[in-house]
Amino acid sequence: MLVKKNLYKDISEPRYGVFKTSDYNLNLEERRSKYKEYEFILCEKCSNAIYKWDCYCHIKFGSNFGILDCNLSLEKRRAKYMNFNGILFEKCNQEINNHYYYCMSCHYKETDIIKKGHMGSNFGILDCNLILEERRAKYEKYSLIFCGKCNNEIFKWNYYCTSCYNKEINVIKKGHMRFGPNFEIFKKSDYCNLNLEERRAKYMNYDGILCEICYNQISKWNYHCIHCYNEETDTIKKGHIKFGTNFKIFNCNLNLEERKSKYEKYDGILCEKCNNEIDKQYYNCNYCYNNQMIINRCKVCFIGNNYDCCSFYEFKQYLENFSKWINENNVFKASKIGISDYDLNEDDRRVKYKNFDYILCEKCDRKY
């Protein structure tokens, strides 16, 4: 009977408290401590229920809140407001997120770049008259950088406005946006008039180099426009773009020593057949060699070995075909026994092949 009485009492008389107007003078922790034992909390002024975790009706933070000062930098804002239960923005009375320390709603709506920057944390307006190093030194400590022309945010990785850069069609203005005053236009005429060393000497001290033809950036590693080079189909023009005047078209009819003697002083050598660059270590086109693009010549001749190679190679091929024909037609039933070069020791192999520039594997045609 006593249990039923207590149960009835608990159901009919739940614990509730009245949140007094004077309680707004308490901070958030003090409010929670005072009302934590109550099941319900009602506002003294309007009788609405108050959520226990928030502990406020219309008045939210009590005495421990601050009004955001936009004239402070981000670090100063954090230092000033980090211990407040809440921060309000004076213009719209919205609560400020203590991760950003500015009103994101007002910041998004604002169109004036100066006011927009002041709302934000710590900002600067990009000065395109500075060179790259000066830009980095000036703006590296800012939280935000804006473009003075379009109000878009500048990324610290670039230190220039990519939106304005992509819209600009004047190559001089594009270079000034991206690199500041210390940039240069790579002239089309320099492809024919300057070799690689002369290009390096002319352009090495600039922060940026732009192609006069397509406006793409030119790498200081190559000193030619990769885009224009890939688009060009004429072998001679490709050679001029990549190497300047000091290049040559490769002649694979020469033996290895003649190739070395003829081409060693050139900056570049291009294959006449496929337009790829010739490997100056081996003086043959690896692309053509690996893709079997050799017409009326064996691979040994192609890499510049001996003049009488083809006759020997053809005779060897004839013997292999003849041997295969004999085996297929069962002319000889006895097994054949031969001595392979793999049966020779290392010294004998060196003696046998010492006068050859290249040695090819009979089975897979790889060079040794």
Image (cartoon, rainbow, N blue to C red):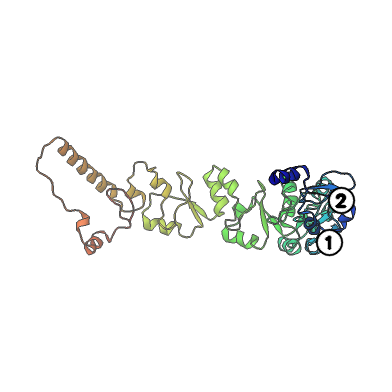
Q: Is residue 35 left or right of residue 219?
A: right
Residue type at mark 1?
Leu
Q: Residue drawn 41% across and 50% down?
A: 286
- Residue at the far top: name it: 329
Q: Are marks 2 and 1 in contact (CB under 8 Å)?
A: no
> What crowding class fits label 1: few (fewer than 14 Cα within 10 Å), some (14-19), or many (20 or more)?
some
Q: In which quadrant will I find the C terminus?
A: bottom left
Q: Secondary structure at mark 2?
A: loop
> What crowding class fits label 2: few (fewer than 14 Cα within 10 Å), some (14-19), or many (20 or more)?
few
> Residue 59, image x and y in percent?
86, 51
Q: Residue drawn 36% across and 49% down?
A: 302
> Residue 69, image x and y in percent?
86, 59
Q: Secondary structure at mark 1?
A: loop
Q: Residue drawn 62% across and 63% down?
A: 201
Q: Is residue 205 left or right of residue 107?
A: left
Q: Nearer the viewer, mark 2 or mark 1?
A: 2
Q: Which residue is mark 1?
A: 72
Q: Is residue 69 visible to us here?
A: no
Q: State which tag comes first along the sequence, 2 or 1.
A: 2
> Residue 188, image x and y in percent?
64, 50
Q: Which residue is mark 2?
A: 59
> Residue 230, image x and y in percent?
56, 45
Q: Residue drawn 57% across and 50% down?
A: 241
Q: In which quadrant will I find the N terminus?
A: top right
Q: Nearer the viewer, residue 227 or 116?
A: 116
Q: Nearer the viewer, residue 287 or 19?
A: 19
Residue type at mark 2?
Ile
> Up-down: is 181 above or below 291?
below
